[in-house]
Amino acid sequence: MEGVDHLADERKKAEFNVEAMKIVWAGSQHNLEVSNRISKLVADDPAFRKDDRTMLPRKELFKNTLRKAAYAWKRINELRLSEEEASKLRFYVDETAYTDLHWGMFIPAIKGQGTDEQQRKWLPLAYKMQIIGCYAQTELGHGSNVQGLETTATFDPHTDEFVIHSPTLTSSKWWPGGLGKVSTHAVTYARLIIDGKDHGVHGFIVQLRSLEDHRPLPGITVGDIGMKFGNGAYNTMDNGVLRFDHVRIPRNQMLMKVSQVTREGKYKQSDVPRQLVYGTMVYVRQRIVADASCYLSRAVCIATRYSAVRRQFGSQNGGPETQVIDYKTQQSRLFPLLASAYAFRFVGEWLEWLYTDVMQRLQANDFSTLPEAHACTAGLKSLTTSVTADGIEECRKLCGGHGYLCTSGLPELFAVYVPACTYEGDNIVLLLQVARFLMKTVSQIGTGKQPVGTIAYMGRIEHLMQCRCNVQRGFAELSADLVEAAVAHCQLIVVSKFIEKLQQDIPGEGVKQQLEALCGIYYLSLLHKHQGDFLATSYLTPKQSALANDQLRALYSKVRPNAIALVDAFNYSDHFLSSILGRYDGNVYPKLYEAAWKDPLNESVVPDGYHEYVRPLLKQQLHTARL
């Protein structure tokens, strides 16, 4: 029934102030107000409709994305939105597009690696979108191993130019978003060659297409790499392939904040610390962690609401069947994901603080926290994206058969999110980097250098001193075990930041108590999952392990009446969720039935192809081929 809230009884069970929890989730009252205003602006505008996205052919889908991006930019200018508001609008439009790379990679790369003069030249054009940029680093043959990139930038002292060239097939740039069909410029990463000497990988601003007719410039071969996983999803993005055939650019288009090439062809370091380039990486990865909480919370919101709507078995004397959410097997799979969404939100807030702290220290030539910051962002990017990708899929399974429908919103959500496990650092490669950091820390125990920050706990583990070893020896052989150690380290960070959040003043009736329950579910579910390790190392006795499991089940019962209110606190509109199963009002079945008839296959009663292929079969009139 329209206008009826089928989840009203669930919402009445809430034992906390939902509006106060919305502020906690948003980060501040200001953030909540901006989110509410921009979310409504997008949801109320039919130009941002997306319910048909999974049914569109690729070319129509992509053109529709271009239309939305242009319209969004028009609205941003008409309404004079601030940078914060414009970013929120792109978030709520909820469609991956070339603008993500323009604002999220191209501009930060110029700000982080360009000189003041270069920033004055390029940033105004980029901010006004008079040029559109992408980030061309990954190649067909190399992704994680950036030092293995093959594209070359050879300095020509006679013309004061760099010659950008793709010497092999595997040196083709491959995957950069926005590159395939839209970007006019790219921050391109290539090996700097001067007088035959290789100075390693550096960034260069290269124009790819004419600003008049959008055709590729001479020496540029560029296009889209083809369809990707899923319906809709990341196919709205023009991931591209790019090859250079001796393309010349002025010397001043090398990004020279850190390293410079003079007119005479001399390579030199600037006065700016080389470590500053890590700032961009820390920024991007902390944004990925923040995004993880958004995507996981969307999936959890859908699965939680549908679990409360769906009833199966357990009918007594003809009464209603049992809500699926009341089964302990459902709670043990769903509630740890709900807790993880909140946990990732809070560790994302901490990473935002860490980024600001690192940048301030770098500006003051203080590099002491950089190794830890690098390890934290690398490890947390890996942990949160892996858990989120797996969590979205688990939420799909928690919704049973209906979760497999595109109208559930979950298949597309999974397809659009799962590449996060690979881009900006393969997750296993990142964990190996964390493992090296941890091994180095262990090797320094007992030398007088006291571990601080997220590794301070290592200074309290005396037996590690007996395990001191050569960092290099046996690393490859033990890499699988070390990856597990890196995951555990990152899980500890998430738990500690959740606990630190709870030590703050959190207003709102019952809010802190619910967060305490979620925190308990988060760390106890990890303990339960890995209890074999805890028991094998004698950190837990069997009795303690049993008590922990009892406490976990008790927390599931504590959270159960608050589950719907806890996902309501995410404050997602039906437009943003784009899921019939996750509708705010719980009116699932009539809407599923209604949506089925909107599928293009139902435009005709008799399908195309019936007369050619089905009727002859039914009438036994198929001609047998002669061999």
Image (tube, rainbow, N blue to C red):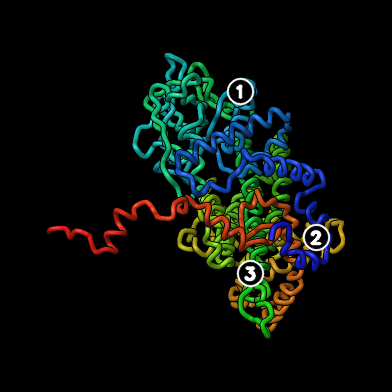
Gap in angstroms between the C-alphas marked 3 and 2: 33 Å
Front residue of 493/609: it is 609
Q: Residue 419 carries which label?
A: none
Q: Considering the numbered disc 3 on the image, is that residue within a helix, a strand or a loop?
A: loop
Considering only order in the chain, which callout, 2 or 3, is on the residue closer to the N terminus? 3
Residue 158, position as x, y percentages in the image: 42, 14
Instruction: Judge depth for marks 1 and 2 and give the one in front.
Output: 1
Counting from the top left corner in percent of width and height, residue 88 is at 69, 41
Q: Distance between the residues labelled 1 and 3?
A: 52 Å
Nearer to the camera, 86 or 200: 86
Which residue sits at x=71%, y=73%? Answer: 556
Between marks 1 and 3 in the image, the one whose residue lies nearer the viewer: 3
Residue closest to the far left: 627
Q: Quadrant of the C terminus?
A: bottom left
Crowd band around label 1 with a 10 angstrom C-alpha radius: few (<14), some (14–19), many (20+): few
Q: Which residue is drawn at 39% across and 43% down?
A: 141
157 displayed left or right of 583: left
Image-quadrant location for residue 366: top right
Residue at numbered disc 3: 310
* Mark 1 and mark 2: Cα distance apart in space: 44 Å
Task: Give residue 226's quadrant in the image.
Answer: top left
Residue 385 occupies quadrant: bottom right
Q: Which amino acid does label 2 sit on?
A: Leu
Q: Which residue has dot 2 on it?
A: 502
Mark 2, residues whose alpha carbon is within 10 Å: few (<14), some, or many (≥20)? some
Image coords of residue 234 (percent x, y):
51, 46
On the picture, is 236 further left or further right than 92? Answer: left
Q: Can you identify the residue that label 1 sits on?
A: 125
